[in-house]
Image (tube, rainbow, N blue to C red):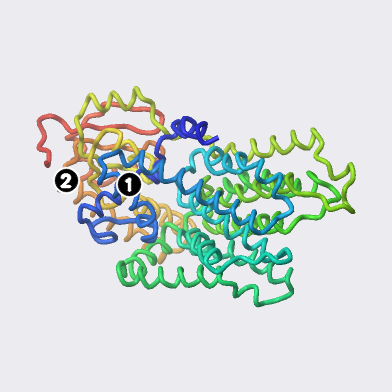
Amino acid sequence: MLAAAIPWQMRWGVIPDTSWVITLCEKMLAGSRLYVDIFEVNPPFTPWMFMPAVALAQEVGISPEVAIHVYSYAICLAGLGFAALLAGRAGLAENRALFRMLPLFLALLVIFPGNAFTEREQLGIALFLPLLVLTAWRAAPREGRVPSAPTAVLAGLCGSVLVLVKPYYALVVLLPALYAAWSRRSIRTLFAVEYWTTGLACVAYVVAVQYFHPEFLSTVYPMLADTYMRVQNMQALLTTYVPIYMVALVTLRFVRPGLPLSPLVIVFTLASLAATVPLIYQGKGWPYHAFPAFSLILAALLLRVAQAAPAPYRSPDTAMEPGRKILLVAIIAAAAIPFMQTQKLSAEFVAKLRAAAHRPTVALVGADISGGHPLTRMLGGTWISRHCNDWLGESAHYLSAVASRDGDKHAASHYRHIADRYIESKLAELEAQQPAMIIVEKIDRDWNEELARWQDYVNFLRGYQQIAENDEVQVLLRNAGATQAE
């Protein structure tokens, strides 16, 4: 399965978010200050999480893209392997079937993610598996089997990664923990070693953020809450994910009718349900935001298949009929559809750009990170901007238009001011850096029209000519006679 995953993931290569994080890490290693010299919308755990792979790649002289993929496969194997080890020590009733199905669980981590592979949520879920298995063990311990303190500490540390990625995933820890406490009829279960470890790791992280990067909490987060986090696409979210998720949820009972859900199935299901809250709260509808909820509910379905029936429930009704197996495969295939879309540019398009400019300096006009990343790295280029894209200006421009439509003059003026300040800083950056190549995202029509109203921007583009275009982007190259910054 792992061997199949490697060529499968080459369809996407290094995805846009990860490509930007590699660039971010390289700039930090070169001396740039996070949130000062270079702007990032995510908390510092994002670059910290990928920094070991990027730093190692520089040390040994290999491509950071290769290092990140190897790093990601290693995390998936480590998380799944530790979860399997815990299942063995717990003596779970499903173990005989579970160990035979390990390749399928690995597929959920390295095949199913598609365009979400190497995302923080995907790696966080891989490391979250041991804590879920330990929670099921706490909920229904077998006689004489108790997890050791070092094992619980390690599981807690692994589980904390998902919360450090984005704090609202704490709910994914809490809901299964509450079930374990209810199952044991003891609130003491909530104070198990693994939960103390996860909590202390999060507290230490907050302290580290405040110490090393106080700008995030004082400046960046308020800006995010005021702009980026207010832009949502609930319609796409509801139509893309809700129908198939509800079918998967109902199928949990239909797959093995008459058989009670095991603690392991319940824990994974509750974790999946909890993961839908961040998905809805973020409201963007991007596949990697949906990965935790979908990977966990699909894992719960596989666990349901593996579930051993106690003697009183052994009957033909608890068997897995061929029709139900086909239904399960269909659900997994349908759930995978949003993860199968690729934003990878054609080799011909990239080759044309390479022929036009050798290792160019690159800028982007557009709010989608995929316009500039990984294209800049594929060209061997240098990213000139503090931002990964125009998310701040475009979000503020959109919110200003919404406020104007709703008659809220104060909000419209507020967001108009943010958009204007961003455009002014972007024009100053373009004038100072004189990038050899500008990538313009065609889908951001409103943003392009807004920039076209600024005469300084129009004048600046007169020094460029279009050299390539596809359905998503136009690529402009600086005229040979124009001055270019080194």
Specify whether residue 446 is in view.
Answer: no
Q: Residue at x 25, y 48 (%)?
A: 385
Within 10 Å of the Cα at label 2, are there few (<14), some (14-19), or many (20+) other Cα atoms?
some
Image vertical order of residue 394 relative to residue 469, above or below? below
- Report the side of 49 relative to 283 (left or right): left
Q: Residue at x 49, y 43 (%)?
A: 116
Q: Residue at x 51, y 68 (%)?
A: 198
Residue with the mark numbered 1: 22
Q: Amino acid at mark 1?
A: Ile
Between residues 390 and 415, which one lies in front from this camera angle? Answer: 390
Residue with the mark numbered 2: 433
Between residues 89 and 116, which one lies in front from this camera angle? Answer: 89
Between residues 202 and 307, which one lies in front from this camera angle? Answer: 307
Q: Amino acid at mark 2?
A: Gln
Where residue 291 appears, as percent x and y from the top left, is: 55, 48
The label on residue 471 is none
Where residue 200 appears, as percent x and y from the top left, is: 47, 72
Report helix, strand or loop for mark 1: helix
Image vertical order of residue 197 relative to residue 118, above or below? below
- Report the side of 476 relative to 414 (left or right): left
Q: Where, by quadrant of the figure, is residue 188 drawn?
A: bottom right
Report helix, strand or loop for mark 2: helix
Where residue 349 appears, as percent x and y from the top left, is: 33, 25
Q: Furthest-front residue in view?
A: 144
